[in-house]
Amino acid sequence: MSDRRLFVALRPPLAVRQQLLAAMEGVAGARWQDDDQLHLTLRFIGEVDRHQANDIAAALGAVHGSAVTARIVGVGTFARRGAVHSLWARVEPAGALTALHHKVNAAVQRAGIAPETRAFVPHITLARLNRSAGPVDAFLARSGSLSTPDFVMDHVILYESELGPDGARYHPVMRYRLLATSAAATADTSRQHASNSGASP
């Protein structure tokens, strides 16, 4: 029984992804994300066996909430030991996204996954960098005012991450619909399969 590397995310609509893709330039050696890789991670899970993957999928089906109306507001970096290792676009409002993160985190904990200890920063990764990449100052100056109109993300998605020589490829396993209002969400517990997925992850 092979393990599966899973995470939970939101997917921005096509128009937003196209705007993000258009901003990806000007950093030597950067490994820019492609369209299939653009998402907002709510919870990274990591490697689990098929039995626990099924438990996670079932637990996420109990997550209720409203579709998130969000927007892109600027860019940022993550660094390790003083070296930038990723570029990202900030997503707001942080409050609504953090509340959904907490619900997802609680659901995967019920499936036996340890709680998340890292701070949650709502963002969409644009590029990953190694120590030979950069500099990033010109990109940050040019894209610091990056913004989008409001957009809606109305599905929580359980993804499988497949690691390869060219980086990770992400495959949607299950989709869970977020409803237009919280009141409607409590009345509807439906769970939708991702396109071309089976009944279990």
Image (cartoon, rainbow, N blue to C red):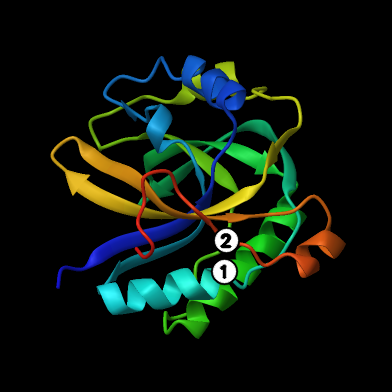
Disc 2 residue type (three-letter): Arg
- Decide if residue 174 is on the left or right side of residue 178: left
Disc 1 residue type (three-letter): Gly
Asked whether 127 or 197 is in front, the reply is 197
Q: Is residue 4 above or below residue 177?
A: below
List the residue tagged with mark 1. 61
- Dividing the picture into quadrants, the one containing residue 51 is bottom left
Asked whether 135 or 78 is in front, the reply is 78
The numbered disc on residue 191 is 2
Mark 1 / mark 2, whichever is N-terminal? 1
List x then y, in percent, for residue 73.
69, 32
Residue at image position (67%, 67%) is 189
- Dividing the picture into quadrants, the one containing residue 177 is bottom right
- Decide if residue 175 is on the left or right side of residue 28: right
Q: Is residue 9 above or below residue 26?
A: below
- Decide if residue 186 is on the left or right side of residue 80: right
Q: Are marks 1 and 2 in contact (CB under 8 Å)?
A: yes
Question: Is residue 116 visible to us here?
Answer: no
Question: Is residue 1 visible to us here?
Answer: yes
Residue at image position (80%, 50%) is 180
The numbered disc on residue 127 is none
Q: CA distance from mark 1 to mark 2?
A: 6 Å
Location of the C terminus by quadrant is bottom left
Q: Is residue 192 above or below residue 165?
A: below
List x then y, in percent, for residue 15.
60, 21
Residue at image position (73%, 64%) is 188
- The secondary element bearing badge 2 is classed as loop
- The secondary element bearing badge 1 is classed as loop
